Image (cartoon, rainbow, N blue to C red):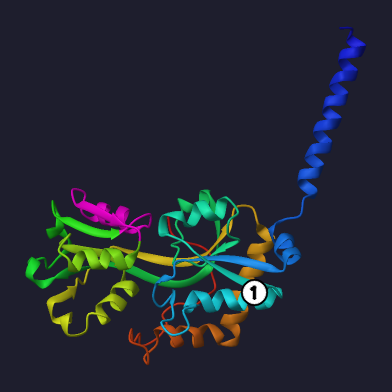
Amino acid sequence: MSLTRRTATASALLAVSASLFGVQVARADQLDDVKKKGEIVVGVLGTDEPNSFIDAKTREFVGYEVDLAKALAAKLGVKLRLKQLAVAARIPELQQGHVDLLAASLTHTKEREAVIEFSLTTFVTGQKVMVKKTSGITAVPQLAGKKVVTVKGGTQEPNIRKAVPNVDVVTFETGPQAFQALQQGKGLALVNDEVSLLDQFAKLGPLQAQYQILDQNLSVEPLAIGIKKGETRLKAQVDGLLRELEKSGEAERLFNKWYGPDTKLKFPRRTFKIDSDKVEG
């Protein structure tokens, strides 16, 4: 092939590449797609009261994170569709485009920042351990060599392994399944977010006297809305809405509605503000 022909061929290939790249850049982003279809699909757990769960009377999803999703859909002027997800499926479902956002008790970690974006922190909790009193376990280090149960795909398993390296961990698809496993004696302890443990403890009724939640925090868990990597315009809309809720006092009202003194969780006050998307390493 002559030098002239090689040069011409190379120029043509560069032109095609530039054209393809231009098409990719010009492609509508996720925010445009959401507005075009008139619907935003938000992934929720549906099993984590009071963040997202099924109302026994209406059979619809309700909860703190559901209300945040409703507020976002209203801000964007689109219909809200909620999709129930397993804990382990949350990030894959977001990455594959099956949901537009995650409002699914999702902990913001440095490791996860490599694969998805996070909104401003919407809630701060910690992880603790619940045991049967008959187990004799009164402190987390006593779980060495013992079997504990927790939910699959969350930060619970790595956190308990960090605290007790030789612990035996058995995982279940949902928090309620892990809670049931503790009651059935399939493990000596249940590891979960403190909020979830308090909710599960409240549901024990008269059996509460047989259980206790250990004092030690395994971790601090900043929860946030999950956003697909690179979707900066959608993140800006989400963060803008959250800042509006904080400024107007609506964020405080939602906290009190689902967590406050008049709920079964009876949190005395909110100890965080919705104002940052930064977490410690």
Q: Is residue 173 visible?
A: yes
* For residue 84, side relative to residue 174 (left or right): right
According to the image, label 1 marks what residue?
73
The residue located at (56%, 86%) in the rendering is 250
In magenta, the rendered stretch is 151-173
Q: Is residue 110 magenta?
A: no
The amino acid type found where label 1 is placed reads Ala
* SS state under label 1: helix
Q: Position of residue 106 (x, y in %)?
A: 45, 63
Q: Position of residue 244 (x, y in %)?
A: 62, 80
Residue 22: image quadrant is top right
Up-down relation of residue 120 to residue 89 (above or below):
below
From the image, which quarter does the N terminus lie in? Answer: top right
Q: Position of residue 117 (x, y in %)?
A: 56, 57
Using the image as rendered, state which of residue 108 and residue 176 is in the foreground: 176
The residue located at (59%, 81%) in the rendering is 245
* For residue 115, side relative to residue 130 (left or right): right
The residue located at (17%, 85%) in the rendering is 206
